[in-house]
Image (cartoon, helix red, strand yellow):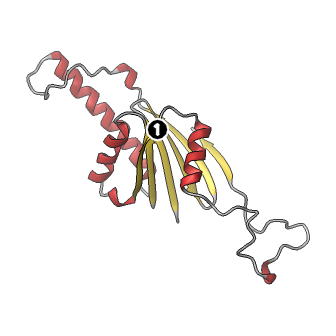
Amino acid sequence: MDKKVGLWLDRNKAVIVTIANKTEARRIITSDMEHYVLYSTVVPGDGSPENLRDRRFWNHLGEYYEKIVAHIRDATEIQIFGPGGAKYELQKHLENEGLARRIVSVEEAEKMSDLQIGIKVQKRFPTRSRFDLSGMNAASSPTGGEQYPNKPLRAEFIG
């Protein structure tokens, strides 16, 4: 199956748009990172309370990225976009999982609505329109009540 995924993410939320079999599905994954604060940039190991909290922060963030990877692992093409460094952290996670060749772009993007995210992904991975009759021949022309031989693109919201 040809599964293409575009996702917008920051450290708090990921919106994953999947296009497969001319069907679009959306999934939102939250990190619950608002409960975690990064206190220092010191390498963990000196035993201070701040370093322990930092280690918890990075571990929790790693679990968030693992949830995302679990949903996009079988994609043939992956588009990543969003603000800040989360997109690069996810890219590194995908590289460590051996999925780097599937990444087609990593782009900067500001905060976007779910609709804007879906439109951006559809522009990157366009599907053949039900109004595009260029691939039809006389034997496959619509007859009777069948106006469009292809299924229309429909959205399924998963949450």
Q: Residue furthest right?
A: 144
* Residue in the image at 19% along x and 22% along y: 52
* Left-right relation of 153 to 9: right
Q: Give percent across and percent down for residue 131.
A: 76, 63
Q: Give percent across and percent down for residue 43.
A: 13, 29
Under tag 1, what secondary structure? loop
Circle 1: residue type? Ala
Q: Give percent across and percent down for residue 92.
A: 29, 47
Q: Residue furthest bottom?
A: 139
Residue in the foreground of this view, choosing between 81 and 67:
81
Q: How many marks?
A: 1
Q: Residue furthest top?
A: 49
Q: Is residue 148 above or below residue 85?
A: below
Q: Residue furthest left?
A: 46
* Left-right relation of 154 to 51: right
Residue in the foreground of this view, choosing between 137 and 65:
137
Q: Is residue 127 above or below residue 92?
A: below
* Residue in the image at 74% along x and 62% along y: 130
Residue in the foreground of this view, choosing between 70 and 116:
116
Mark 1 crowdedness (10 Å alpha carbons): few <14, some 14-19, many ≥20: some
Image quadrant occupied by the C terminus = top right
Which residue is denoted by mark 1 in the rendering? 109
* Residue in the image at 69% along x and 55% along y: 153
Q: Is residue 38 above or below residue 120?
A: above
